[in-house]
Each structure stands twice: as structure tokens, then as C-alpha cells.
Amino acid sequence: MRLLLIATLTMHATLLQAASFDCAKAATKVEKLICTDTTLSTQDETLASVYRQAASLTPGDAEPKQSQRTWLKRRNAC
């Protein structure tokens, strides 16, 4: 029983890693994978930071957001 509790708490803690989105709301296989892998989660945070910086260079321009949506669709299709 104790082992089950430890495993459950570990899994819950893993889901709360610092991805660029709320892991409690992870819906796709890719999002769930990002939330359970420390390396992917860190890379996701880095990519999100670079995206925010790039988007800030063109305020009001819809292209970065549309490009991001297209990229996410491709990523999720893998």
C-alpha cells in the first residue's frame, strides 16, 4: 500500500513539471508526454520563451500566432 501511495505521488508530481502550458489540462498524447518528461518539459519552456520573444518583435501581426498553430498541428500529428 505504501508503495502505491509513493508511486501515485511521484506520478502526480511529474505531471506538475514546468511545461509552457498547464499540465493538469494536458489533452493530447504530445502534451502528456511533455508533462511526464523533464527534458521535453524544459525544451518546451525554452521554445515557448523564444516564441514569445519573436512574437513581441511584431506586435499586432497575426502571422506568428498562425505559424504557431500550424506548427502545433504538425507536431501533434506525429
Image (cartoon, rainbow, N blue to C red):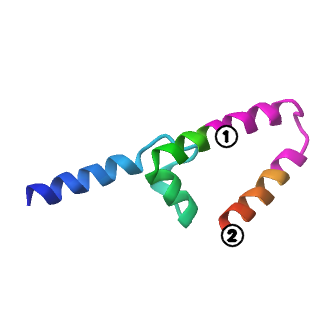
- How crowded pointer 2 is (Cα within 10 Å; few <14, some 14-19, many 20+) is rated as few
- Residue 33 drawn above or below residue 19: below
Q: Identify the amino acid type marked 1.
A: Ala
Q: Is residue 51 magenta?
A: yes
Q: Quadrant of the N terminus?
A: bottom left
- Which residue is painted at 28% across and 50% down in the image? 10
Which label number is shown at residue 61?
none
Residue 42: give x, y in percent of width and height.
54, 39
Residue, far front: 39
Q: Quadrant of the C terminus?
A: bottom right
- Tell me the element at label 1: helix
- How crowded pointer 1 is (Cα within 10 Å; few <14, some 14-19, many 20+) is rated as some
Choose between 47 and 59: the one closer to the eye. Answer: 47
Which residue is disc 1 drawn over? 48
- Tell me the element at label 2: helix
Q: Is residue 21 left or right of residue 62?
A: left
Q: Identify the amino acid type marked 2.
A: Ala
Q: Could you give the CA–CA distance between mark 2 and mark 1, rounded to whole angstroms?
A: 19 Å
Which residue is disc 2 drawn over? 77
Magenta segment, which residues?
46-65
Q: Is residue 62 magenta?
A: yes
- Residue 2 drawn above or below residue 29: above
- Which residue is painted at 51% across and 48% down in the image? 22
Residue 14: give x, y in percent of width and height.
37, 48
- Residue 8 drawn above or below residue 65: below
Choose between 37 and 60: the one closer to the eye. Answer: 37
- Residue 68 drawn above or below residue 17: below
Q: Earlier along the polypeptide chain: callout 2 or callout 1?
A: 1
Which is the main secondary structure of the residues drawn in magenta?
A: helix
Residue 47: give x, y in percent of width and height.
67, 40
